[in-house]
Amino acid sequence: MLKISIFVLLTLTLMTPNVFAQDEMLSNQKIELTADNSAYQEGDVITITGIVEKVIPGMPISLQVFFGKNLIQVSQVKVSHEGQFSDTIVAAGKQWSNEGSVLIKASYGGTASTELTIEFFKDTSGEYQLIKEVEIPEAGTFDIPYTMKGGIVSSIKLVQKNLSLEIEILTKTDGVLDINLSRNNIDSLSNQGQDIEFIVLMYEKDSEIPIQTDYREIQTDDNYRAISIPVKQGDEKIEIIGTHVVPEFGTIAMIVLAVAIVSIIAVSAKSRLSIMPRI
């Protein structure tokens, strides 16, 4: 009995410094947590990465995902010897039924933790919540249906000389602009009449130099081309450039064309009169 007591005492004595050392490490632990974006749509894959400053061998990091007060996902993620960890979350399923802020919490050892907030939007491709009226200089107006996630559209301007639409935006987070473009108002076609890509330029905050950005064509028919353009927090203007805009001739060009047509008719009339047989 005495031997057992001595053995237990020695074991506890040897373990105590390790426990204290581990507690000391966890109490001063620092965790970095990042996502590959700040906003996501339904069906997107969210990639979470991070670094633990002080690694405890064999201890995973716990990732919890909250939508409001509801815990919707928990995972235990392996931490490398260098303190790095990574995990992916698919933003789909019954838990992802509403739009809003999503909180991701990383905990290590039960005491150290850090949090990250992202924005989640439902996929509403092909559904347009708002309409913006666009002025055609000296020729009326037309409407553009759109949905903006992560900000608002403050104005849309037709720039005939650039064959483009200029869209002024105010962004709160990363997001997306889905916009339905009537082919009668703007289109991008080859010389053979086939669809070609629009050029989409993005102007970031306080920058006059645009960056060409990719977009996704979500719906196309004989009358419309609907496209989805990703936006980043801080973006201020989008320019969509095609091969023609409405009207295909500006006001001055139309006047010149009208004068030319009248002149042709007049010349033709004189020519016909000059060859008419005399009675």
Image: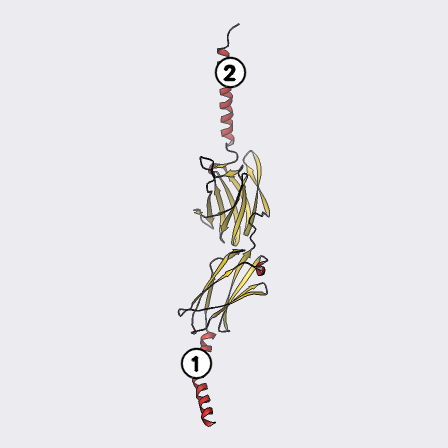
Amino acid type at circle 2 is: Ala
Q: Are marks 2 and 1 in contact (CB under 8 Å)?
A: no
Dot 1: what SS? helix
Q: Residues within 10 Å of mark 2 (few under 14, many from 20)?
A: few
Of the numbered discs 2 and 1, the one sitting upstream in the chain is: 1
Q: Which mark is residue 18?
A: 1
> What x and y, as percent, mark residue 3?
45, 93
User: Alpha carbon of mark 2 to alpha carbon of mark 1: how far?
Assistant: 108 Å
> What x and y, as percent, mark residue 89?
50, 61
In the foreground, 255 or 131: 131
Dot 2: what SS? helix
Amino acid type at circle 1 is: Asn
Residue sitting at the far top = 279
Q: Which mark is residue 193?
A: none
Residue sitting at the far left = 82
Q: Residues within 10 Å of mark 1 (few under 14, many from 20)?
A: few
Please give the count of numbered marks on the rendered protein. 2
Residue sitting at the far bottom = 2
> What x and y, as percent, mark residue 117?
52, 61
In the image, residue 139 above or below residue 91: above
In the image, residue 25 above or below residue 225: below
Residue at x 50% of width, y 43% of height:
166
> What x and y, as percent, mark residue 35?
48, 60
Q: Quadrant of residue 56?
A: bottom left
Read off the residue under disc 2. 269
In the foreground, 2 or 133: 2
